[in-house]
Structures are given as structure tokens and as C-alpha cells.
Amino acid sequence: MTTTTIAARKNWRTPTVVLICGGLALTVALGTRHSFGLFLQPMTQDLEWNRQTFAFAMALQNLVYGIAQPFTGMIADRFGAARVMIVGAILYAIGLLWMSNPAGGADFSMSAGVMIGLALSCSGFSIVFGVIGRAFPAEKRSMALGIAGAAGSLGQFIMLPFGQLLINQIGWHYALMTLALTILLIAPLSAAMVEDKDSQPVSQNRQSIPEALREAGRHKGYWLLCLAYTVCGFQVMFISIHFPAYMTDQHMPPEVGMAALALIGLFNVLGSYTWGWLGGRHTKKYLLSALYLARSVAITVFIMTPVSPWSVYIFGAVIGFLWLGTVPLTSGVIAQIFGVKYMSTLTGIAFLFHQVGSFLGIGLAGFLFDTTGSYTVMWILTIAMGIVAGILNYPIDDRQIERSPAAATT
């Protein structure tokens, strides 16, 4: 084999290929995850569970996802994202098969909660964004992350109708089994995420993970960013899991709730790209403040407006545009401050906070509904927390950290 042939094989993983394959992996992984809310009504009715049983498993999934994310991020930064993603695909498929035949609430929590939570930590934003962040130069990074985030949103738009179709045609049991086969597409896509560590500048390899963690731990802005990210998880996962049931409570057919979530996914494609594009041209922390505050305004208008299919669809479009624009902006701020070598690790820790918020958003909503018979208190909390997150992002010191040459990472 000639040197030219070997070089060609090494060079096929261009930044564009990395972005496409990473985006498609997110499409499958996150699109499947966002379809779980469709299973709340049919599973709780058939299995005679209350909503809190289902909600607890989904909340546990998000908590496990968050707790595991820093560790899978460290493993990906140390040993490569591709290996982590393959393990994630296998765990995800096993979890879905197990989830399709639960022996009870505790069994469902182990499958949908623990197993799929671990799988998501191996195939979610932090793992893919670390590779994409290193593949693109700083001036193009926010846009690339926005495009990848949009791909994850496209998965929501595709997988929600797909999941609803499966439930309607073959029932929730076989729908989950079909999704288990679909999720294995992540494995071949991960081949593009193999990185050539030797091609990175020598200066990038001198800071250790413990040093990077100590540096981030001393940075006040990093903790403000993480705390605000908690609100993002609280808001989006409450809506993702409980919105279809909320629509049923409002005497709307299940298809209206599904269509709203699909619209969220569709408009999030535009939103993620737009917020990522804006992040390359304007101050990211101010954009984050504006995004969180805009969410609170959108939710306030929605709950104060009489519910109709059109009000639901308009809300889906508006909140979709604001949905995951936080992801490229938050990741972009982290890369801007700390560099990209340990981006999976540091965004993974931030994502832990996001998932703590997700756990609280899903679990608290289930508890409040079973206690009060409505989601009214939950909507009010969601609005208030958006305002808090907008305030937290504003004072972040987003200047790049200056290090001695021996410790440089950018």
C-alpha cells in the first residue's frame, strides 16, 4: 500500500464529514429520546400505572445521563469518542428492548432510567460536540456546533411522527423494539469520530484532566453557566415528557401534542443554527440571557391564551426556535474560556447540571400533577426559572484564560 493511499484513508475524516456523521448520530440518539413522551399515556393505561411511575423513570434517566456524562466525557477525551459511542449504541438498544417488556415500575426505572441514561451519556451532545469543536477553527466553531445541534433537533422532528406511527400501527411494545434496531445506526456513524491525536498541536497535550478540572472549578463564570444550564434541562424535559399528556388533559387528541413536539423539533433546526450563527458574531453570554428570557415570555403567553390547536402549534414553533439554542452557545462559551482539548469533559460537567434540572422538571411535574390534578404550578415555576437563568448568564466573565506556554491548551 502506497504512502498516498494511507494518507488518503487518514484524511477522509474531514471537518465536514465529522459534522455530518456526528449530526446524524445525534439525530438518531436524541430523536429517539424525545419520543419517549409519546409512550406515557399508552403505557400507563395498559400497565395501570400512575403518571408519577413513568415520570420517575424518565427523571432517573436524565439524572443518570447527567451523572455519567462527565465520566464518559473524560473517557472520550482520553480514549476517543468513537469507542464511547459504540458502547452507547449497544446499551441504548438493550435498554429499549428491556423497556418494551417491564415487569413493574422498578424494572422500568432500571431499563428506561438507568440503562438508557448511561447510553445517552455515551451518545449525546457532549461526546459529539467535543470532536466537532476540535475539528473546526474558533471562528467557525459556534456555527458548526449550531448545525450539529440542529441535526439533533431534526431527529425530534423525524422520530416523533415515526414513534407515533409505530405506536398507532403496532402498539407501544413493538414500537420500542423497532426503535432498538434503529438506534444501532449510531455504531457505523461513529467511525467518522475517530481523531488523530498526533495531528493536534503539542501545546494542546500538556494540560492534564485534573489540571483542567481545577482551572474550571476556580472560574466563577463556569459555575454561573452550569447553574443556568440547570434551568434549560428543567424547562425542555418537562415539556418533552409531559406536554402530550397535558394536551390530552386539555381535551386535545394525542396527535396535537405529537405535532407540537414535532414542530418544536422542526423549528429547533432553524433555532439551533441561528443561535449558533449569532454566537459566532455576538457575545454568547448575552445571547444566552436573551434566549432564557424569551422562553419565559413565550410560556407566559401560551398559558394565558385559550388552548386551541393553532395556539398549540404556534407555541411549538416559537418554543422550538428557543429550544436548544442554549447548547451551541453554552458549549461555545466553555470552548472560548478554556479551549477545546477537554471540551467533552467540561461540557459534560455542565450537562450534569442540565440533567439535574431535567430530573427535577420531569419528576416534580409528575408529583405536582398527581397532587394537584394539573400542571399550573409547574408552568409558573418554569417561567420563574427562565428569568433566573437569564440573570445568571449576564455577568459571566467569558474572556479566554491566559496560561503559561507549558500549560497552554488552545
Image (tube, rainbow, N blue to C red):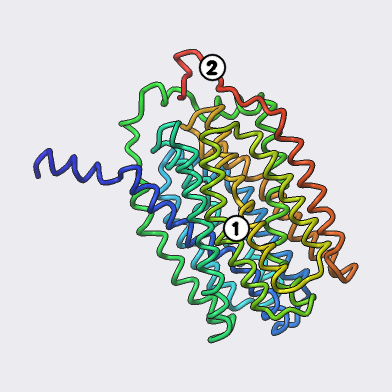
Q: Please tell me in which quadrant of the rendered image residue 114 appears.
A: bottom right
Q: Is residue 267 above or below residue 177?
A: above
Task: Determine whether, in the image, residue 138 is placed left or right of residue 235.
Answer: left
- At label 1, the amino acid type is Gly
Task: Determine whether, in the image, residue 195 is placed left or right of residue 260.
Answer: left
> Which image quarter is the N terminus in?
top left
- What secondary structure is found at the residue carrying circle 2? loop
Q: Residues within 10 Å of mark 2 (few under 14, many from 20)?
A: few
Q: Residue at x 72, y 47 (%)?
A: 294
The percent position of residue 182, horizontal first and vertical second, equals 44, 70
Q: Is residue 214 above or below residue 312?
A: above
Q: Viewer-proximal residue, 46 or 131?
A: 131
Q: Please tell me in which quadrant of the rendered image residue 352 appears.
A: top right
Q: Residue at x 66, y 57 (%)?
A: 318
Q: Residue at x 54, y 65 (%)?
A: 157
Whichever of labels 1 and 2 marks the residue nearer the N terminus, that label is 1
Q: Which mark is residue 101?
A: none
Q: Residue at x 62, y 69 (%)?
A: 36
Looking at the image, which residue sits at the far left?
Answer: 2
Q: Viewer-proximal residue, 246 or 349?
A: 246
Q: Viewer-proximal residue, 97 or 216?
A: 216
The percent position of residue 297, horizontal first and vertical second, equals 76, 51
Q: Is residue 351 above or below residue 39?
A: above
The percent position of residue 215, horizontal first and vertical second, equals 60, 24
Task: Determine whether, in the image, residue 130 is placed left or right of residue 232.
Answer: left
Q: Which mark is residue 117?
A: 1
Q: CA distance from mark 1 to mark 2?
A: 36 Å
From the image, tell me which residue sits under label 2: 402
Q: Viewer-proximal residue, 141 or 172?
A: 141
Instruction: Please name which of the two marks, 1 or 2, marks the residue nearer to the observer.
Output: 2
- At label 2, the amino acid type is Glu
